[in-house]
Image: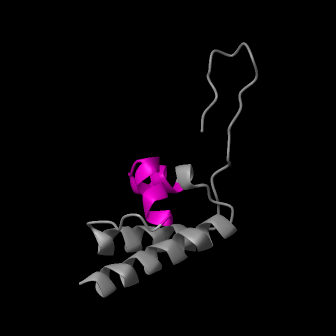
């Protein structure tokens, strides 16, 4: 059981690393797949593995296929009434 969980963690970590190499931040990945940033960080560090592994792997594969990567920060000119978005 431990080996199986480790293999799953390795798959998730590999996909997260590949996304980060393409310019994705963990915050953007978390937002796109509907998870908390801390959750994605714990997957990335190997501390936890997702309970819904197949769904998460499919979502990460979908992000890897995207041509456009979200910007790290989106700033709006001061005085327009909008706040900084992540």
Q: Which x, y percent locates residue 8?
A: 37, 79
Q: How many marks?
A: 0
Residue sitting at 72 percent across and 12 percent down?
Answer: 79
Q: Nearer the viewer, residue 83 or 8?
A: 8
Image height of 29 relative to 58, above or below: above
Which color mode does the image show?
one colour
- Image quadrant for the C terminus? top right
Image height of 54 relative to 42, above or below: below
* Residue situated furthest left in the rendering: 1
Identify the main secondary structure in magenta.
helix
Q: In this rendering, would 77 be left or right of 81?
A: right
Q: Which x, y percent locates residue 7?
A: 39, 84
Q: Which x, y percent locates residue 28?
A: 55, 51
Image height of 43 relative to 86, above or below: below
Residue sitting at 75 percent across and 17 percent down?
Answer: 78
Q: Which x, y percent locates residue 53?
A: 31, 72
Q: In this rendering, would 43 be left or right of 54?
A: right
Q: Is residue 64 magenta?
A: no
Q: Is residue 44 magenta?
A: yes
Q: In this rendering, would 75 be left or right of 58?
A: right
Residue sitting at 50 percent across and 72 percent down?
Answer: 13
Image height of 52 relative to 79, above or below: below
Residue sitting at 55 percent across and 55 percent down?
Answer: 26
Quarter holding residue 1: bottom left
Quarter holding residue 75: top right
Please give the range of residues in magenta: 29-45
């Amino acid at each position: 059981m431990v080996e199986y969980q480790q293999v799953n963690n390795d798959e998730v970590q590999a996909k997260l690393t590949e996304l980060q190499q393409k310019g994705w931040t963990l915050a953007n990945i978390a937002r796109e797949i509907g998870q908390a940033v801390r959750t994605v960080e714990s997957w990335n560090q190997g501390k936890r593995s997702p309970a819904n592994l197949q769904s998460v792997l499919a979502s990460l594969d979908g992000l890897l296929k995207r041509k456009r990567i979200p910007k790290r920060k989106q700033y709006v000119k001061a005085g327009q009434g909008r706040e900084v978005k992540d």
